[in-house]
Image: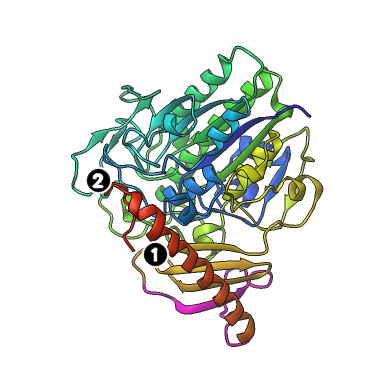
């Protein structure tokens, strides 16, 4: 089979339950629903972190965040570095396979020269570099600048600053992606990375999207409107693939970077109570948490030439699996790269088992592991700044996906085994952090020192 084109679409702070094909009854995402129907929908897909920079690093490198050199939300000032240049990305790997590469949207893996998309394998890119911007002015206002800068304009095209004041950013991102696809002038395969910033705060949407959901409460209505704009953009991209006659030969992956945000910064009226516009679909926890609500996210995969339509995949997988899956599909050799993820195409297309025995996570003092039906969380917190729910929490996800019952005392041997596995994995992450990544940091990365 010829090399497929590859499209990876990422949303920001979108909860597991915030797609109509994932169970949302109060909003509609018809284009994403069609994408799901054309291939596979995952019930047990995970981001590799409950916050954005580390999860994006994992998706693009095929590694756990700590093995990719990004473990925290990175700074947003223009001297902030991020993803180390020596870590290969999916873009750089596919470029070596003859692919054209492009990114349109949110980067959040470094702003300083040497840390930008062109330094990590992207031939063309347009979008912004910090963690969030105003959707209309494209200015970064938020506190991750660490006192190093005032509010900063943050919209770029191929490394040059551009100004599109007043243009709704989600629509601009979609339009730039479609234009790039439309203007491709030969038959070389391409890799398109489309990381939307929606529905991350600030909660902005034009009236045309808000008017689609007149009966919803204000917090849910703006969430639905922002996702509807993303859905329209995905529809436009898919329509352009079909116009070019390449839809059947294109591997498309859609997922979110972490669970929904409850941050008060979602409000635009000074409200200081948690925001509940997004939903985890009944899972416990949210963004910043290693319980399921913070890391189990919506995911779809379509490749009509290879993946049967209408498939539902219930085996565990994670965003770090995108790199090896896409690379193998492109004819690459996985042994040429350091990878923690695995090729999941046999699982998705042929109904095979998950290639993972264990999947691990870490966030500040939290550590977690999933093994089959079992999930262990150490120092698990429901959200940022909350005290730990319990030092050790064991759940049977097959019987209790909401992690409502702690089974640590009922299964002490399993608890001890999973605790040892999680602590051993975490110790290796910490050792590498101290001995490889921190000595190479220049003080502007936003990386934690411990």
Is 396 magenta? The answer is: yes
Q: Report crowding for label 1: few under 14, some 14 to 19, many 20 or more residues within 10 A (C-alpha).
A: few
| Residue 104 x/y as whole percent | 47, 29
Reply above or below: 362 against 76. Answer: below
* First in sequence: mark 1 vs mark 2: 2
Q: Quadrant of residue 438 in the image? A: bottom left
Reply above or below: 115 against 125. Answer: below
Q: Nearer the viewer, residue 120 or 294?
A: 120
From mark 1 to mark 2, how far is it between C-alphas?
Answer: 20 Å
Please report contact status of discs 1 and 2: CB closer than 8 Å, yes or no: no
Quadrant of the drawing holding the N terminus: top right
Q: Main secondary structure of the magenta part?
A: loop
Q: Which numbered dot is residue 145?
A: 2
Quadrant of the drawing holding the C terminus: bottom left
| Residue 4 x/y as whole percent | 70, 29
Q: Tell me the element at label 1.
A: loop
| Residue 100 x/y as whole percent | 57, 23
Q: Residue at x 28, y 58 (%)?
A: 272
Magenta segment range? 387-410
**Numbered circles on residues, count:** 2
Q: Report crowding for label 2: few under 14, some 14 to 19, many 20 or more residues within 10 A (C-alpha).
A: many
Q: Nearer the viewer, residue 150 or 359?
A: 359
Q: Residue at x 41, y 50 (%)?
A: 219
Q: Nearer the viewer, residue 430 or 284?
A: 430
Q: Residue at x 68, y 40 (%)?
A: 333
Going by the image, does 14 lie left or right of 109?
right
Going by the image, does 376 lie left or right of 276?
right
- Residue tagged by mark 1? 364
Reply above or below: 159 against 359. Answer: above
Is 92 magenta? The answer is: no
């Amino acid at each position: 089979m010829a090399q497929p084109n590859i499209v990876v679409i990422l949303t920001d702070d979108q909860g597991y339950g915030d797609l109509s094909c994932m169970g949302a009854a109060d909003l509609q995402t018809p284009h994403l629903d069609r994408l799901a129907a054309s291939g596979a929908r995952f019930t047990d897909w995970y981001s590799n972190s409950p916050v954005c920079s580390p999860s994006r690093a994992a998706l693009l490198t095929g590694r756990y965040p700590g093995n990719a050199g990004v473990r925290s939300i990175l700074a947003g000032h223009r001297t902030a570095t991020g993803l180390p240049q020596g870590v290969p990305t999916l873009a750089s790997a596919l470029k070596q396979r003859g692919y054209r590469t492009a990114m349109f949207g949110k980067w959040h893996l470094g702003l300083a020269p040497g840390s930008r998309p062109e330094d990590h394998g992207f031939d063309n890119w347009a979008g912004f570099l910090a963690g969030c911007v105003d959707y209309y002015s494209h200015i970064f206002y938020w506190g991750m600048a660490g006192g190093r800068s005032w509010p900063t304009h943050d919209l770029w095209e191929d490394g040059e600053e551009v100004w599109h004041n007043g243009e709704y950013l989600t629509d601009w991102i979609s339009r730039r992606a479609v234009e790039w696809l439309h203007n491709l002038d030969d038959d070389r395969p391409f890799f398109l990375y489309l990381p939307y910033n929606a529905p991350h705060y600030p909660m902005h949407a034009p009236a045309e999207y808000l008017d689609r959901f007149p009966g919803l409460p204000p917090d849910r209505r703006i969430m639905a409107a922002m996702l509807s704009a993303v859905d329209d953009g995905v529809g436009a991209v898919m329509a352009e693939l079909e116009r070019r006659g390449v839809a059947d030969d294109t591997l498309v992956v859609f997922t979110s970077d972490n669970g929904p945000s409850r941050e008060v910064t979602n409000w635009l009226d000074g409200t200081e109570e948690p925001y509940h516009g997004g939903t985890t679909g009944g899972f416990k926890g949210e963004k910043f948490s290693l319980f399921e609500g913070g890391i189990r996210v919506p995911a779809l995969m379509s490749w009509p030439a290879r993946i049967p339509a209408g498939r539902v995949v219930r085996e565990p997988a994670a965003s770090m699996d995108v790199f090896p899956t896409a690379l193998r599909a492109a004819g690459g050799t996985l042994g040429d790269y350091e990878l923690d993820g695995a090729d999941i195409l046999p699982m998705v297309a042929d109904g095979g088992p998950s290639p993972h025995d264990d999947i691990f996570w870490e966030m500040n003092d939290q550590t977690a592991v999933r093994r089959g039906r079992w999930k262990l969380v150490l120092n698990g917190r429901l959200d940022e700044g909350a005290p730990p729910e319990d030092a050790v929490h064991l759940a049977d996800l097959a019987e209790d996906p909401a992690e409502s019952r702690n089974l640590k005392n009922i299964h002490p041997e399993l608890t001890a085994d999973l605790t040892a596995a999680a602590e051993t994995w975490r110790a290796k992450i910490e050792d590498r952090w101290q001995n490889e990544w921190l000595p190479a940091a220049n003080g502007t990365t936003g990386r934690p020192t411990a």
